[in-house]
Amino acid sequence: MNANEVVQFVDDALYTKMGQHLNDLQQGVILGVLNHQKYSDIADEFGKSEGHIKDVGYELLKLLSSVFEEPVSKANLKSVLERNKNLNFSFGDNVIHSHIISCSNINFEPSNLSSAKSEKHQTQKAKIQKLRDRGFNDEEIAEILDISLELINKSDETHEKSTL
């Protein structure tokens, strides 16, 4: 079962049991956990703080515990999903990386993913600029947007490059 199918299975189970779908961040947390990523790495990928990802992960695992009617943790997510799907996901140490990494963009074509990331980046840069115009400093902006100072600095660097 590839990463796309795993996410679809979890989304279907969640919707059937709770009437809600996974959001993009929850999908990313599932894929990251199955790929043995740290919350800090997942946070970097999504431009969020590690604390925010931990909170999302905690709530998601609690939700999945209700859906699958057994305790779900980072350590047992794969086995819970395997038991409930009655399929072997083929997540050996080497196989998981190729499945998760090759499918982690979940139904996005590479060009769509690139434009979606670019659009998200432009939106974030605009938010940062609006907050600066209102007198907020970078630390306050990072807290308000729940992003790292690094991302604010990266936003400045890309703005400088585009104006040169």
Image (cartoon, rainbow, N blue to C red):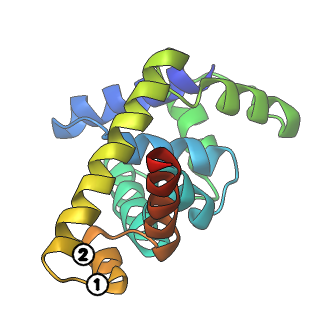
Residue 73 visible, this angle: no
Q: Position of residue 94 (x, y in %)?
A: 87, 34
Residue lying at 54% horizontally and 18% vertically, measured from the top left:
110
The three-letter amino acid code for the residue at tag 1 is Glu
Around disc 2, counting alpha carbons within 10 Å, would you say few (fewer than 14), some (14 to 19), or many (20 or more)? few
Q: SS of the residue at dot 2?
A: helix
Q: Is residue 18 left or right of residue 5?
A: left
Give the residue at the far right of this rendering.
94
In the image, residue 11 above or below residue 60 = above
Residue lying at 77% horizontally and 27% vertically, measured from the top left:
98
Distance Cα–Cα, label 2 vs label 1? 6 Å
Nearest the viewer among 138 and 156 is: 156
- Could you tell me if the residues under marks 2 and 1 are in contact, i.e. CB atoms within 8 Å? yes
In the image, residue 123 above or below residue 96 = below
The three-letter amino acid code for the residue at tag 2 is Ile
In the image, residue 117 above or below residue 113 = below
Q: Position of residue 71 (x, y in %)?
A: 46, 59
- Quadrant hosting residue 22: top left
Q: SS of the residue at dot 1?
A: helix
Rendered-image quadrant of the N terminus:
top right
Residue lying at 47% horizontally and 26% vertically, measured from the top left:
113
Q: Is residue 112 left or right of residue 131?
A: right
Which mark, by number, is residue 144? Answer: 2
- Quadrant hosting residue 11: top left
Q: Position of residue 123 (x, y in %)?
A: 27, 47
Residue 54 visible, this angle: yes
Residue lying at 37% horizontally and 61% vertically, measured from the top left:
56
Nearest the viewer among 98 and 48 is: 48
Nearest the viewer among 13 and 153 is: 153
Q: Position of residue 150 (x, y in %)?
A: 53, 70
Query: Residue beneath label 1, please?
Result: 140
